Amino acid sequence: MSARISVENKHLAGTITLPGSKSISNRVLMIRALCSEHFQIENLSQSDDTTRLSALLDSSDTTLDTHHAGTTYRFLAAYLAIQQGEHILTGSAQMKKRPVKPLVDALRQLGANISYLEQEGFPPLLIRSPNEQLQHEVSLPADVSSQFITALLLIAPVLPDGLSLHLNGAIVSRPYIEMTLAIQSFFGIKHRWEGNNIIIAPQKYEPNHFKVEADWSAASYYYVMAGLSKTATIRLNGLYAASLQGDAAISQVAMKLGIHTSFVDDGIVISKSADIPIPPFLELNFIQTPDLFQSIACLCAGLGINGLFTGLQTLKIKETDRIAALQNELSKVGVFLTKMPSKFSKKSGTTYFMQEGRATSPDVSPDFETYEDHRMALSLAPLALCFPIIIKHPEVVSKSYPNFWQDIQLLGLNVQFIPTDN
């Protein structure tokens, strides 16, 4: 199936109730599983990833299949590593291409009994009861996915001697680590930083009613739509200024592009006036907010803003290689994302990507591939405000935002689903 998306009126107005944050939902589900008492979770994400995690945590099966859900896989690997019994943790063919070695190495340091069933360093895993004496110190490269780090932090309080987690090198995606620690604090868990070390003593999670805030990553797609509109007044329900999510930074980035954010009761209003001047160039480091990259790149493409981007190193191990995927798709509309030669980063060690060009419609509506990656579909869709587009396999959005296609129609975008042969 494909989706043809077009817009007749580029003056956007409407109200959207965003889904609950997948990142927060998954963390709170894990905490509830590790807690001695059940507690209520309000506004839990309805995404595929969260639904699957909830089901697997309640399952008595010895083989657990996470399908495409990377967060679910990593969190469950750590959780099962401290449980008694024997489990096989597997996933889709796509999941079997996503590396898990840094987390497995760290869990083995703690005393976990884990074996690879197929390719070394990748799912599926055979996880047996851990050693009788679990260790309390572990080292992990700080530039790996924050999901590996979070998986360890979530089990830390219930380890016999707690955990001293040493992060070696420069920490990437720190807001996601801070999110985890803040949520743990809500459930009574104390921690401390000592340089790059996070220390959590053995403690008990305290049950507590929890309301999941709306997803700022989902909000980013509406910022792109506002930016590509002639005028916009879009209310997004469920967002707060004091957010746990690092992706709330989208409001500051958008301000540079003439998109204003007003915080109101239980939400925000995104607004853009006509004829707002935009900068010709934007330089951003995504090391703390990698999930915003595709949104910002597509916004710059639609506006014709040249960009210089850094901090993209974790994007190669997401649902797809998001850099390569975006390079392929933006090139279809005359926008080019290029890795700069190494001479530009000889001293700093920083890898730079230059984006140039303004999205222009080819003779026929461009067909955008989604690479089994929800964020490719979600971030490319707003380009329909520039010209009609086609998104292949639009169903991938269910991974994080199942109601996306219905919601954008509330703003006046036209979505037509087209059966295809492949």
Image: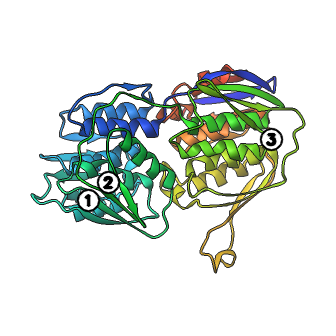
Question: Mark 3 — residue?
Answer: 258
The residue shown at (66%, 66%) is 352
| Image height of 33 relative to 147, above or below | above
Instruction: Using the rendered view, name the quadrant where residue 166 is placed.
Output: bottom left
Q: Which mark is residue 152?
A: 2
- Residue 175 x %, y %: 51, 51
Instruction: Using the rendered view, name the quadrant where residue 62 is placed.
Output: top left
Are there few (<14), some (14-19), or many (20+) residues within 10 Å of tag 3? some
Instruction: Using the rendered view, name the quadrant where residue 11 is placed.
Output: top right
237 left or right of 151 in image: right
156 left or right of 260 in image: left
Q: CA distance from mark 2 to mark 1?
A: 8 Å
Which element type, helix, strand or loop, lies under badge 3? loop
Which element type, helix, strand or loop, lies under badge 2? helix
Q: CA distance from mark 2 to mark 3?
A: 40 Å
Q: Which amino acid type is shown beneath numbered disc 1?
A: Leu
State whether residue 212 appears in this view. yes
Q: CA distance from mark 3 to mark 1?
A: 46 Å
- Nearer to us: label 3 or label 1: 3
> Which of marks 1 and 2 precedes in the sequence?
1
Q: Which amino acid type is shown beneath numbered disc 2?
A: Leu
Q: Which mark is residue 414?
A: none
Image quadrant holding the N terminus, namely: top right
- Residue 309 x %, y %: 67, 59
Q: Which amino acid type is shown beneath numbered disc 3?
A: Gly
User: Mark 1 and mark 2 in contact (Cβ < 8 Å)?
Assistant: yes
Question: Mark 1 — residue?
Answer: 107
The residue shown at (62%, 68%) is 351
State whether residue 94 appears in this view. no
